[in-house]
Image (cartoon, helix red, strand yellow):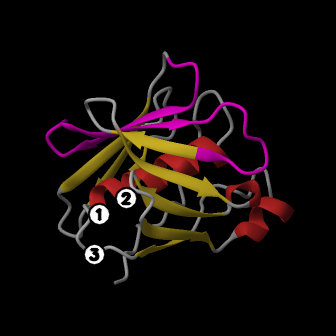
Amino acid sequence: MRRKLISARALIRVKDLDGRQVLTVNRKIAALRSTYDVKDRYGNLLGRTKKAILTLFHPRMWMEDARRTKILEAKCSFAGWNFTIRDKNGRGLAEVHKSDWWRDVFLRGPFDFSDTYALHIRDKSYDRRILLGFVIAIDNSVHDRPGISIRGFGIRPPVMID
C-alpha cells in the first residue's frame, strides 16, 4: 500500500504482491462528512464510505454502492480502535482490531505515522477488495487529522489471513 506524502485527496493505491494495482481509496474533497471512494483497478466505483457526523466516542461508518444503496456498516468500539463490519442484512462479515492502539495513547504526534490492523474476514465469499478499502477509509476517517494528509512513510503492506 502506498500513500502520497502530501495529498489533498489522501490517495492510496493498494497493490498485490506482483505490483499490480488492486484498488484505490481517496477522500472526496467537496463533502460535508468524511467521505471516501473505493475504486477497482479500472476506476470503477466499488463503494463510497461515509462517516456519521455526530458520533464522538463510538464512530459509525457505512459504505454505499454506486446506486447509493447502503451495503456495509461498521460500528466501532471506543475511540475507533476495533470494529465490526456488517452487511445490509446485519450479518457479520469481518472484524477489525487495531493492534497498535497504545501508540495512539502514548506516542500521538511525530512518531505516529503508521497503523497496524488485523482484519478477520468471516465471510470468505465477500469481495475482499471492498472490505479492505472500507477498513482503509475507516482508518483515514477516524484516526487521521482533518486537512491535508502528510502521512505516507512507514506504511506496512496489508496482510490478509484466512
Identify the residue under disc 2.
131
Q: Amino acid at mark 2?
A: Leu
46 or 108, nearer to the observer: 46
Residue 135 spot, x, y in % from top left: 47, 56
In the rendered view, would you say 129 is above or below 28? below
Question: Is the C terminus in the top left, top right, bottom left or bottom right quadrant?
Answer: bottom left
Residue 26 spot, x, y in % from top left: 40, 36
Numbered disc in front, either 3 or 2: 3
Label 2, label 1: how far apart the Cα atoms are: 5 Å
Sequence-wise, the earlier of marks 3 and 2 is 3
Residue found at the far right of this picture: 106
Residue 150 spot, x, y in % from top left: 59, 39
Residue found at the far bottom of this picture: 162
Residue at 68 percent across and 56 percent down: it is 80
In the rendered view, would you say 57 is above or below 159? above
Question: Mark number for residue 128?
Answer: 1
Q: Can residue 1 be seen here?
A: no
Residue found at the far left of this picture: 42
